[in-house]
Image: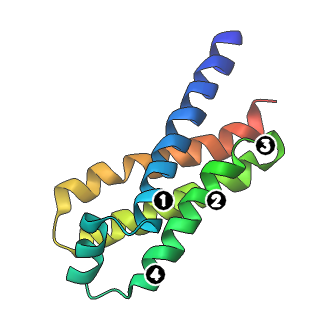
Amino acid sequence: MKIIRIAFIVLVVAVSLLSLAAGVAKLVMAEPEVAFFDALGVDPRWMIALGLLQVSGAVLVIFKRMRIVAGLLMAAGFAVSALMILLSGNTGFALISALPVVLALLVAFGALRIR
């Protein structure tokens, strides 16, 4: 059981760092993010909203009682990003980008089981 707890903590840290990095890139309006949103014709305000969603999930995961909500927020952020990648026509990368969605859902639902 101890190994499962350690694996879950590693998963939480990895997913939250990924969400934090993705969110911060959007909040600071990194050039690749701006170009990607612009190419899809998406208003930059949505980039800020998505960045806030991703950063919020990454921060909330610190609090044990908020892990379910945090996992769902991160999963939603990753899902929106994967959908946008799919809409850009990059199907292969969109499929790979769905992996963080699954991992974030494991964080959310793993928090239900691991107490």
**CB contact under 8 Å: marks 1 and 4:** no
**CB contact under 8 Å: marks 2 and 1:** yes
Quadrant in the rendering for residue 38: bottom left
Give the structural element (helix, strand or loop) at label 3: loop
* Upstream in sequence: badge 3 or badge 2: 2
Left or right of 56? Residue 98 is: left
Residue bearing mark 3: 63
* Upstream in sequence: badge 3 or badge 4: 4
* Upstream in sequence: badge 1 or badge 4: 1
Give the structural element (helix, strand or loop) at label 1: helix
Q: Which mark is residue 56?
A: 2
Question: What's under tag 4, amino acid-wise?
Answer: Trp
Q: Residue at x 30, y 77 (%)?
A: 37
The percent coordinates of residue 44 (x first, y second) are 39, 83
Label 3, label 1: how far apart the Cα atoms are? 19 Å
* Upstream in sequence: badge 3 or badge 1: 1
Label 3, label 4: how far apart the Cα atoms are? 27 Å
Question: Can residue 71 be seen here?
Answer: no
Residue bearing mark 4: 46
Residue bearing mark 1: 23
**CB contact under 8 Å: marks 2 and 4:** no
Quadrant in the rendering for residue 36: bottom left
The percent coordinates of residue 115 (x first, y second) are 82, 30
Question: How many C-alpha atoms fall within 10 Å of the one at disc 2: few (<14), some, or many (≥20)?
Answer: many
